Structure formats: structure tokens, C-alpha cells
């Protein structure tokens, strides 16, 4: 909820033979005021207006990355737009599984003159899946290596992992639990809104883990669920941060942040120990997402997963900040090709389906 990432890619082929070349990448930060608008939108009017406002932001980002690549809008076949998730209620949280991403595709298409594929998660949910994670398809397409299993760990707001090998149907992927979401919520509270994250790990490095608070956090029911599973702000967002803040009002802010970092590290490591390491001999873990910029988080995760090697995903040839945007360029391409791009072994869907909706 802090920026729009836009990439321009050349994509050739589809499915197992797809080839992707990254041509340009831009990051357009949201203002703190706009981030707060996204966080606070709840009533129908606020969500309705936010949908169109986000569409304008996404269109501007698309036009900027096209210019950065030295091309024109008419050179581009399609835009893939994931949108901003404002609600995600999988079957583990609701009797009516549903998900909602905002960023009006009609606005993007009208401003750019380019067809848009959007709303990727809903078809997987309609097919009985969690609607997440969707990035495993990219992880398999770009990063599989014959004869080995690789773990691709994302540390965004939520943490998620994909384990990829030669066959798509052997892919295992699920949300590991909290990524940066709890830390970011605490940073906003500790700083009175001046900080949106534990910048460079400064707060957590000065703190000490509070054991009883960590154990309470690790008792979160989501962490006991077997895959396929997906999480969101509903489980690890403001409600959890508020409970933690009120429960620990006499705790040093630095200690709270150190505990939140350890919550992410321990939830991630336990997910590996429970669901992955008994099944796979992993070559290494390749990490992406905003959490990679928090040195304390990366130091702790590397130590906790040792002797398993932990590397930034950049070493595989794709800039970390571009990865998720590249994913939705790929999914837009697969939509046009008619190629199913969900991974039922990751989402729990009954079958493979073509993802997304096309806006001419």
C-alpha cells in the first residue's frame, strides 16, 4: 500500500515455453495521505471513489514505464493489473469465500488506449480455490531448474512461499503468515504516522524480543492451518496490531518491533519445518518483497533457516522490486493465449482455469 510497481515486458510463447524479457521498471510511491486513504476506506462511497482513484494511479504508472522504455502506448498489446487488495476472505475465514481488488480497469484502458486484463483472483475462487497465491506460476515459469527444488519466499505485507521444480503440477505454494504487515502497523503507531515501516531495521535492532508476547502471536490460528491457505489484512492487519499495542502498552516500542520481526521469522521458519523440509531437499531460498530491505529481518531469517542458504531473488536475474509486476504481465499474456495460469496445488482450486477479465 505504499507504491505502484510497473514493468514493461516482452513476452514470447506461453505455458512451459514462455520467455520473458524485462524492458523497463518504475516505482511510483503513494503519498502518505493516499496510503492512509487506502487503509481507511470502508464505506461504499469511499471504496467506490478509491476504485477510480487507484485506476488513475495505475494508468499513470503504465504510461511512465512505457516512456521509460522509449516506446509508445500503441506499441503495447495489453496491461495486466492486479489491483489493490482491500478484502480477502478465503474459505478458512468465510462461508462465502470472496476477494476484492480495486483499481478500475476501464480507467486504465481509457487513459492509456491499451486493453487491460484485471481481477485475476476471482476465477480461481469460483473454482473452489483460495484465490492466492498466484505468483507460483511466475516462479515456475522463470525460476525452475532441472533436478532441484527451489523455494521462492516473498515478504510483502503477508509472507508466501513457492517451491518449484520441473513440473508445474508438483509446485507447492501457500501463505506462510505475516510478512511486514504487523511491523508496518506498529511503525505507524510508534511514530504517530511519520513512519510506514521499521526503516532499515532501526527500531527492531535496538529492541529485545518479549517471549510471552511472541508465544501469544505464534498461537494465531492461521499458523496451524495446513496448506492450501491464504491470509490477508483480516488476520494480520489493524485488528491484530491494535490488540498487540493495547496488550503491551507498557512495553518499549523497540521491544515490540523486535517481537514483531521475530513473529515473521518464526512463523516463516515453522512453516518450512512443518510443510516443506520433510518433503523437499531445497537447493536454497530466494527472497523478494519489501521485507528484503529490512536488514534485521533478513539477518534473523537467514540465521533461523540455516544451514539452508538464503539469497535475494536478484541473484536469479530478476530485480526484486519488479517481480510481482512481471507476474501480472505474464498472467495477462496467458489470458490472451487462453492458457490456464492458476496452480491448483497452491490455491486448492478444483481445476486449472484462465485467470482475469479483459477490458478492451
Image (spheres, rainbow, N blue to C red):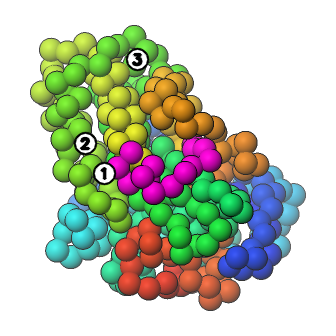
Q: CA distance from mark 2 to mark 1?
A: 7 Å
Residue at figure coordinates x 60%, y 36% from the top left: 309
Quadrant for residue 178, please give it: top left
Residue at figure coordinates x 58%, y 61% from the top left: 164
Q: Is residue 126 visible?
A: yes
- In the image, is residue 339 above or below residue 292? below
Q: Nearer the viewer, residue 268 or 198?
A: 268
Quadrant for residue 241, please give it: top left
Q: CA distance from mark 3 to mark 1?
A: 23 Å
- Residue highlighted by disc 1: 233
- How many discs appear? 3
- Residue highlighted by disc 3: 203
Q: Position of residue 116 (x, y in %)?
A: 61, 76
- Check disc 2 and report its element: helix, strand or loop: helix
- Check disc 1 and report its element: helix, strand or loop: helix
First of labels 2, 1 by sequence position: 1
First of labels 3, 2 by sequence position: 3
> Are the residues tagged 2 and 1 within 8 Å (C-beta)?
yes
102 falls in the magenta region? no
Q: CA distance from mark 3 to mark 2?
A: 19 Å
Residue at figure coordinates x 64%, y 39% from the top left: 312
Q: Nearer the viewer, residue 354 or 209?
A: 209
Q: Position of residue 12 (x, y in %)?
A: 80, 75
Q: Viewed as shown, does residue 245 lie left or right of 38? A: left
The residue segment tinted magenta is 273-287
Tag on residue 68? none
Q: Position of residue 327 (x, y in %)?
A: 61, 63
Tag on residue 238? 2
- In the image, is residue 299 above or below residue 255? below
Amino acid at each position: 500500500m505504499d507504491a505502484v510497481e510497473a514493468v514493461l515486458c516482452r513476452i514470447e510463447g506461453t505455458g512451459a515455453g514462455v520467455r520473458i524479457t524485462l524492458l523497463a521498471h518504475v516505482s511510483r510511491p503513494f503519498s502518505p495521505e493516499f496510503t492512509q486513504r487506502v487503509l481507511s476506506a470502508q464505506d461504499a462511497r469511499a471504496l467506490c471513489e478509491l476504485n477510480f482513484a487507484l485506476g488513475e494511479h495505475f494508468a499513470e504508472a503504465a504510461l511512465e514505464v512505457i516512456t521509460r522504455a522509449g516506446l509508445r502506448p500503441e506499441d503495447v498489446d495489453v496491461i495486466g493489473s492486479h489491483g489493490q487488495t482491500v478484502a480477502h476472505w478465503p474459505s478458512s475465514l468465510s462461508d462465502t469465500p470472496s476477494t476484492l481488488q480495486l483499481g478500475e480497469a476501464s480507467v486504465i484502458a481509457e487513459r492509456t488506449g491499451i486493453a487491460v486484463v484485471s481481477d485475476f483472483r476471482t476465477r480461481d475462487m469460483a473454482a473452489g480455490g483460495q484465490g492466492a497465491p498466484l505468483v507460483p506460476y511466475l516462479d515456475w515459469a522463470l525460476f525452475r531448474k532441472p533436478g532441484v527444488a527451489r523455494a521462492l519466499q516473498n515478504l510483502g505485507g503477508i509472507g508466501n512461499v513457492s517451491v518449484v521444480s520441473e513440473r508445474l503440477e508438483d509446485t507447492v505454494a501457500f501463505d506462510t503468515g505475516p510478512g511486514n504487515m504487523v511491523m508496518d502497523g506498529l511503525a505507524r503507531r510508534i511514530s504517530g504516522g511519520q513512519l510506514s515501516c521499521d526503516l532499515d531495521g532501526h527500531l527492531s535492532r535496538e529492541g529485545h524480543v518479549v517471549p510471552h508476547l511472541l508465544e501469544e502471536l505464534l498461537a494465531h490460528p492461521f499458523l496451524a492451518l495446513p496448506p492450501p491457505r491464504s491470509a490477508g489484512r483480516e488476520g494480520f492487519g489493524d485488528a491484530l496490531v491494535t490488540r498487540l499495542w493495547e496488550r503491551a502498552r507498557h512495553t518499549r516500542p523497540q521491544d515490540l518491533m523486535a517481537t514483531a520481526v521475530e513473529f515473521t521469522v518464526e512463523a516463516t521458519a515453522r512453516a518450512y519445518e512443518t510443510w516443506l523440509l520433510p518433503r523437499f531437499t531445497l537447493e536454497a531460498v530466494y527472497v523478494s518483497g519489501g521485507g528484503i530491505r529490512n536488514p534485521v529481518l533478513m539477518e534473523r531469517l537467514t540465521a533461523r533457516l540455516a544451514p539452508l542458504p538464503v539469497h535475494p531473488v536478484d541473484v536469479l536475474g530478476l530485480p526484486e522490486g519488479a517481480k510481482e509486476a512481471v507476474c501480472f504481465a505474464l498472467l495477462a499474456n496467458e489470458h490472451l493465449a487462453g492458457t490456464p495460469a492458476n496452480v491448483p496445488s497452491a490455491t486448492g482450486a478444483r481445476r486449472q482455469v484462465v485467470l482475469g477479465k479483459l477490458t478492451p
